[in-house]
Image (cartoon, rainbow, N blue to C red):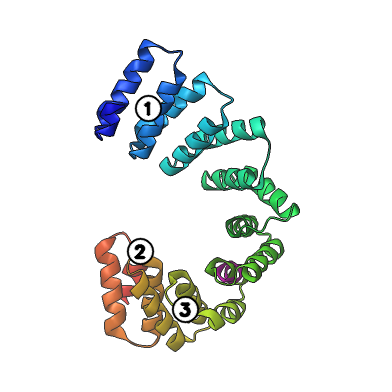
Amino acid sequence: KLTLAQNKINEAIAYFIKAYDIDQNRIDILEEAANLSLRSRQLDQARDLYKKLINIDKNNAYYLSTYIDLMVMRGDYDNGIIALESLIKLEGETTERLTQLGILYYKLGNSLKAKPLFEKLLEIGDTDATVLHFLSSIYLEQNKLDSSIVIAYRLMDHFPSDPRGYLDVALVELNGENPSGAIDILEPVSEKFQKEFSVQYLLGSSYQQLKEYDKATTLLRRSLTIYPDSRGARHTLAIATDAMKYWSESDSLYEGLIASDTNDVQALNNYSY
């Protein structure tokens, strides 16, 4: 304790671990080392210690919850899911746990497991914005446009300050080959979300599909002030400026694309003309 008071944190953690090795009945000492590692942001060590604590006491909800958070921070979704499912088995389902489990499965790329969890949350009245966004995205991936747009509108209506709802609706419209529908959704909020790259980019791309190049170039240039490294926006703007005969701007865009990727066939072909 004196070592801890003197802020010699690493030494304190080492002493706690050594003390536990001497008397392994003192799980409280190991827990102290784990908590101190966490508080001092020594996350790798904290993860190892909480994993050790779980191996000792598999039914400790605090150990499981903390370990889950540490796994998520690390991006280790597999182990996070295992721990979270153990916690749900131990203490039962809550909307928070189901939400976290669905999001972890989605981030792991397992839409098959994520989808029923998100649908269950909607059935019990949950309207978490991330759940709605991911579920709309899953339906879109499955080409279930009608289902996707219903969820997207729900997100847009419940969370009008969240750009994801408008973007999700616009993506459904674009996937349905209806750029005018995407414009109808994004145009009224383009100033509200003027710092959101995806809003400006999708709106500009929608105008380009309608060959309204003047509006398209304005929006695409704006999108690139937000995210200059977007190859998609640079490609789209290059095509639009070509169409408007802004040769120097389009040439500059193609040259930049080719310089950063000499295998960019689209840029090479367009630039050659």
Q: Residues within 10 Å of mark 3 (few under 14, many from 20)?
A: many
Amino acid under disc 2:
Val
Question: Of residues 91 and 1, which is closer to you in this image?
Answer: 1
In this rendering, the answer to whether 84 lies above or below 143 is above
> Which label number is shown at residue 204?
3
User: Looking at the image, do the residues carrying marks 3 and 1 touch, with CB atoms under 8 Å apart?
Assistant: no
Secondary structure at badge 1 equals: helix
Q: How many angstroms separate mark 3 from mark 1 (CA)?
A: 54 Å
In this rendering, the answer to whether 218 lies above or below 64 is below
Of labels 3 and 2, the one closer to you: 3
> Which label number is shown at residue 14?
none
Q: Which residue is mark 2?
A: 265
Magenta stretch: residue 73 in it?
Answer: no
Q: Position of residue 200 (x, y in %)?
A: 46, 76
Q: Which residue is mark 1?
A: 33
Of labels 2 and 1, the one closer to you: 1
User: Looking at the image, do the residues carrying marks 2 and 1 touch, with CB atoms under 8 Å apart?
Assistant: no
Of labels 3 and 1, the one closer to you: 1
Magenta part, dominant SS: helix
Amino acid under disc 3:
Gly
Secondary structure at badge 2 equals: helix
User: Looking at the image, do the residues carrying marks 3 and 2 touch, with CB atoms under 8 Å apart?
Assistant: no
Q: Position of residue 164 (x, y in %)?
A: 55, 66
Question: Of residues 238 and 38, which is closer to you in this image?
Answer: 38
In this rendering, the answer to whether 210 lies above or below 133 is below
Q: Which residues are magenta?
A: 166-172
Q: Is residue 3 left or right of residue 93?
A: left
In this rendering, the answer to whether 191 lies above or below 147 is below
Name the residue rendered at 41%, 67% in the picture. Answer: 232
Q: Position of residue 19 (x, y in %)?
A: 34, 16
